[in-house]
Amino acid sequence: MLVNRFVSQRSLYTVPEFVAKNLPKVYKTQEQYDLVAKEQHGKLVEDLNQKVAQTIFEPLSPIELMERLRNDKTKVHIFNNCSHLINNHLFIENILPPVKPVSIDNKIVKALFDIYKSESLEDLCRKLKTEMNQKLIGQGFFYIIEEGNGKISTLFSNNQGTPLISTAGLKFQDLDLNGGILRPNDYKNYNDRLRSVKVALNEKAKVKASSKKNIEEGQIPGSDLKILAIINLWDYAFIKDYGIGNVARETYFENCLAELNWDVVLKRLEI
């Protein structure tokens, strides 16, 4: 379970205790870490409790809620809450210091070197920072994922986007037209992405129309993508320690990549 529960008069989601002997190296202060792992995470948990209290959704776990509500436009606020909660949980787990040092010389890093044509972690970080600035305007997350065919790849998603649900990429939320002043090339990228979304929606409609059997609620097949690592790129995840602006976010992002707990990441690969 990603979110623990206890039972009183009704089931409540509770904030997990993220146990670490030392402060994650990516953070400079306990205050910043507590903001991410306790205050903000606690708010996400409290918000979810309020949204599902005394409803038919109350007994469901966050991932079950996402599966149930993925196509319900009236419940987007619950879906996004669950997505953000799960993303932040996985992020905290993979930046907690490992019990013992783990080598970065592993199949995931080697796959990333191959994808980005890099021979060093420094060069990989530089290329990923460039990609982040091109693809992420505003809040979001960075993922290292494993596809259904075993291929390792990366993904940036805006806001509370997630690769867990939609194989068509419709839940990545990588279209954010509320993010500041856009450069000319940004509008072209958005236009290309909108075209891709329209194609995916049309294909989805064709599949649904040709289906002889309606899929029962809650049994909609999930994505074949597996999250291996997440970096939280929302402002609250770094603003107290690093400040604001692209340079601050780049420094924080680079530190997160350098301090990923590969023990946790590699165990997710085995699941």
Image (cartoon, grey):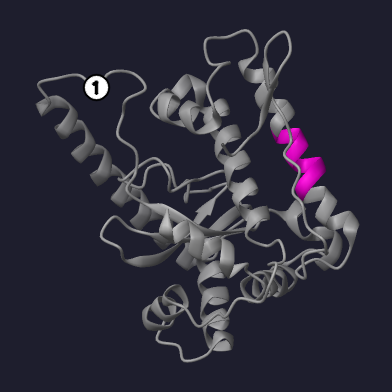
Left or right relative to 225: residue 252: right
Left or right relative to 264: residue 212: left
Residue 9 percent across, percent down from the top left: 72, 8
Q: Look at the numbered disc 1 and give the secondary structure of its residue.
A: loop
Left or right relative to 44: residue 131: left
Q: Residue furthest bottom?
A: 119
Closest to the observer, 264 or 173:
264
Give the residue at x 57% y 82%. Answer: 126
Give the residue at x 54% y 51%. Answer: 158
The residue identified by callout 1 is 215
Vertical arrangement, residue 185 with respect to residue 226, above or below: below
Residue 244 in magenta? Answer: no
Q: Dominant secondary structure of the magenta stretch?
A: helix
Closest to the observer, 264 or 237:
264
Give the residue at x 76% y 48%. Answer: 37
Closest to the observer, 14 or 167:
14
Residue 232 percent across, percent down from the top left: 64, 56
Give the residue at x 43% y 60%. Answer: 269
Vertical arrangement, residue 37 with respect to residue 56, above or below: below
Quadrant in the rendering for residue 198: top left
Closest to the observer, 191 or 137:
137
Residue 145 percent across, percent down from the top left: 43, 60
Q: Residues within 10 Å of mark 1 (few under 14, many from 20)?
A: few
What residue span does the magenta drawing correspond to? 37-44
Residue type pointed to by label 1: Ile
